[in-house]
């Protein structure tokens, strides 16, 4: 099996847009890692996330806003020979991206970003009450770097 590096932005965005969740990794100032699965929206090189206003992740991000976000799609167990354990691999496409989190506080912009997140999952139009907008933390992550790999490709 081999790994293929994909460098085209369209290929990377296709992987991102095909995912239902992403994994957001952050590191506290003592180096302790913290990784969360999160729902997201994506548009124009920016990932949008949402969470509660407070909590461990918010505390960590206030101290260190750098994040690594991983997206993985198209997973399938494959093998070159069914009787040889080490010939098994997982075929997958993944994107690893890095950026810095900033938090949006403007209610109108928060509404627009929530709409971007929801658009990733549904074609419905949603309305948000003032308490919902006030009580949600919106993360904006402009992606500084992205890489894309396809693993478990047959070496034919």
Image (cartoon, rainbow, N blue to C red):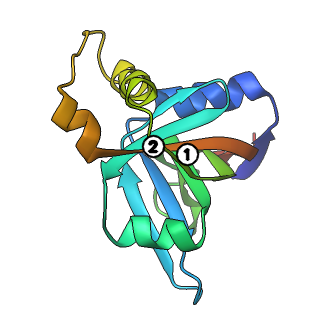
* Residue sitting nearer the eye, 129 or 80: 129
Secondary structure state at the residue bearing disc 1: strand
Q: Which residue is identified by label 2?
A: 76
Farthest residue in the bottom direction?
30
* Residue sitting nearer the eye, 49 or 16: 49
Q: Residue at the spot x=37%, y=21% of the render? A: 115
Q: Is residue 141 above or below residue 32?
A: above
Mark 1 and mark 2 lie on one chain; the one further toward the N terminus is 2
Tell me the number on the disc at residue 26. Answer: none
* Residue sitting nearer the eye, 66 or 70: 66
Q: Residues within 10 Å of mark 1 (few under 14, many from 20)?
A: many
Q: Is residue 146 left or right of residue 81?
A: right
Q: Is residue 113 left or right of residue 156?
A: left
Q: Residue at the spot x=42%, y=21% of the render? A: 112
Q: Is residue 32 above or below residue 92?
A: below
Q: Is residue 29 left or right of residue 123?
A: right
Is residue 79 visible from the viewing direction of this image?
no
Figure quadrant of the C terminus: top right
Residue 108 lies in what quarter of the image? top left
Q: Residue at the spot x=52%, y=64% of the render? A: 25
Q: Residues within 10 Å of mark 2 (few under 14, many from 20)?
A: few
Q: Which residue is identified by label 1?
A: 91
Asked if the residue at tag 2 contacts the one at tag 1, i.e. Cβ–Cβ closer than 8 Å, the answer is yes
Give residue 93's position: percent from left, percent from top: 59, 41
Give residue 6's position: percent from left, percent from top: 78, 37
Is residue 27 visible from the viewing direction of this image?
yes
Q: How many marks?
A: 2
Residue 87 lies in what quarter of the image? bottom right
């Amino acid at each position: 099996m081999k790994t293929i590096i994909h460098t085209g932005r369209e290929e990377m965005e296709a992987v991102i847009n095909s995912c239902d969740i992403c994994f957001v990794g952050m590191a506290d100032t003592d180096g302790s890692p913290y990784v969360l699965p999160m729902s997201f929206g994506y548009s124009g090189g920016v990932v949008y996330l949402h969470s509660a206003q407070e909590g461990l992740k918010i505390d960590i991000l206030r101290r260190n806003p750098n994040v690594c976000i991983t997206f993985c799609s198209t997973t399938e167990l494959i093998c070159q020979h069914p009787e040889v354990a080490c010939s098994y691999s997982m075929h997958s496409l993944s994107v690893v991206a890095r950026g810095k989190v900033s938090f949006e506080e403007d209610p109108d912009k928060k509404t627009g970003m929530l709409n971007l997140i929801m658009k990733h999952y549904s074609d419905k139009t949603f309305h948000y009450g003032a308490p919902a907008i006030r009580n949600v933390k919106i993360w904006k992550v402009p992606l500084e770097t992205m890489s894309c790999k396809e693993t478990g490709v047959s070496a034919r």
